[in-house]
Image: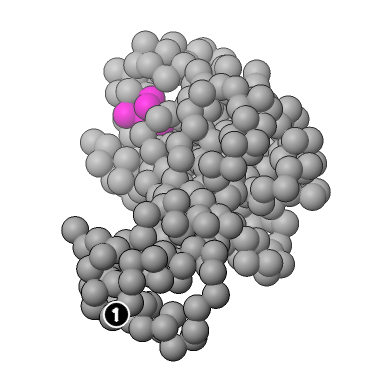
């Protein structure tokens, strides 16, 4: 590991001069500063985080706030987290992951310690109790998700309303007239989580617009619950020929349940989903789906924060349009 003394020897200066160049605590000539910086770059020296903080008045750390609440599908959340970490490293920043359900108190504690330069907040609810604090903090923040009133905030996400609409439009274009939405676990709707609510809004609006009979069914993330929802849908809508799934863990169990109840996918029942592409592609019957763009959203949230930290204006709202990939699970209505 390269030490500060190695940099000093290479640049022909004292270790204290290297320290001053890093911290800015004392003035040094531009020529000397350049020699130190050239040596740092050539030797690959990585300054201690404390020295970097002194030089820039920043910690070079971002906080990613991901409360792991009931009903959250952790594998998808971790895709967002990996994307944020990868993008942050490109900007020489580390990421502090906060997973506790602490609300405003947790955010305030982190902000007051000066541990981080900025915040990325996930699992945003329509009437999120954290919003007044986020609007008032000196720390820049970006929300992955949209509350009901996003004014004064910086938000980025997939356009989930449009995603719900696009799934219905695809089924409508294939002639399906009776469809159902198998949605997130009930507690996600009770909390008024933004993305889940918006899928329902888009699904319902598009079904009404196309004169399609539709219904919405929250579903626990378990195979037994998928079976119960499939049975309920067929009891209530015996003419059912199309289903939209917005609940990653039950996608394959739901297809299995419908087939055990006598409906072949896609021969009798067309299935679309809002889920990661890799999940849609590995199901026994590859599913027509709208991708969850975790990489794009996570990296986009970091880019927005870097601009805010640099004093560059950013848009308040960044909505990524949905992209539908047609696979083997949808066909024209029988």
Q: Pick the residue in front: 125 or 241.
A: 125
**Which residues make up the magenta segment?**
248-252
Residue 40 in sight in this render:
no
Q: Pick the residue in front: 45 or 96.
A: 45
| Picture quadrant of residue 334 | top left
**Whether residue 77 is situated above or below residue 257 in the rendered picture:** below
Q: Position of residue 177 (x, y in %)?
A: 58, 37
Q: Residue at x 67, y 48 (%)?
A: 139
| Picture quadrant of residue 196 | top right
Question: As drawn, is 20 to the left or to the right of 222?
Answer: right
Q: Position of residue 181 (x, y in %)?
A: 54, 30
Q: Quadrant of the N terminus?
A: bottom left
Type of secondary structure dominating the magenta stretch: helix
The single residue placed furthest to the bottom in the displayed view is 31
**Whether residue 261 is situated above or below residue 27 in the rendered picture:** above
Residue 264 in sight in this render:
yes
Question: As drawn, is 6 to the left or to the right of 207?
Answer: left
Q: Position of residue 323 (x, y in %)?
A: 49, 57
Q: Pick the residue in front: 120 or 322.
A: 120
Q: Which residue is mark 1?
A: 11
């Amino acid at each position: 590991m390269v030490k500060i003394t190695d940099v000093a020897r290479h640049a022909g200066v004292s270790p204290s001069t290297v320290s001053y160049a890093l911290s800015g605590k004392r003035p040094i000539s531009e020529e000397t500063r350049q020699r130190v910086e050239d040596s740092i770059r050539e030797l690959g020296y990585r300054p201690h985080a404390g020295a970097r903080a002194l030089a820039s008045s920043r910690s070079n750390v971002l906080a990613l706030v991901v409360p792991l609440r009931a009903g959250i599908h952790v594998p998808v959340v971790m895709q967002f987290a990996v994307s944020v970490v990868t993008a942050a490293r490109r900007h020489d920043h580390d990421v502090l992951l906060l997973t506790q359900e602490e609300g405003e108190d947790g955010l305030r504690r982190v902000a007051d310690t000066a541990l981080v330069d900025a915040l990325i907040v996930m699992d945003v609810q329509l009437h999120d109790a954290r919003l007044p604090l986020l609007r008032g903090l000196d720390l820049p923040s970006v929300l992955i998700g949209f509350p009901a009133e996003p004014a004064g905030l910086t938000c980025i996400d997939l356009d989930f309303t449009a995603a719900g609409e696009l799934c219905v439009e695809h089924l409508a274009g294939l002639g399906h007239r009776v469809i159902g939405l198998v949605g997130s676990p009930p507690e996600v709707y009770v909390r008024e989580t933004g993305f889940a609510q918006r899928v329902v809004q888009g699904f319902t609006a598009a079904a009404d617009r196309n004169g399609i009979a539709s219904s919405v069914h929250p579903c626990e993330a378990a195979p037994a619950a998928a079976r119960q929802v499939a049975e309920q849908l067929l009891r209530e809508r015996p003419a059912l020929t199309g289903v939209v799934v917005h609940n990653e863990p039950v996608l394959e169990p739901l297809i299995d349940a419908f087939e055990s109840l006598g409906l072949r996918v896609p021969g009798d029942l067309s299935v679309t989903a809002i889920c990661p592409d890799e999940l849609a592609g590995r199901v026994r019957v590859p599913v027509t789906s709208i991708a969850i763009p975790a990489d794009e959203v996570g990296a986009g949230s970091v880019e927005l924060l870097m601009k805010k930290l640099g004093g560059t204006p950013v848009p308040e709202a960044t909505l990524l349009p949905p992209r539908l990939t047609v696979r083997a699970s949808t066909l024209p209505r029988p």
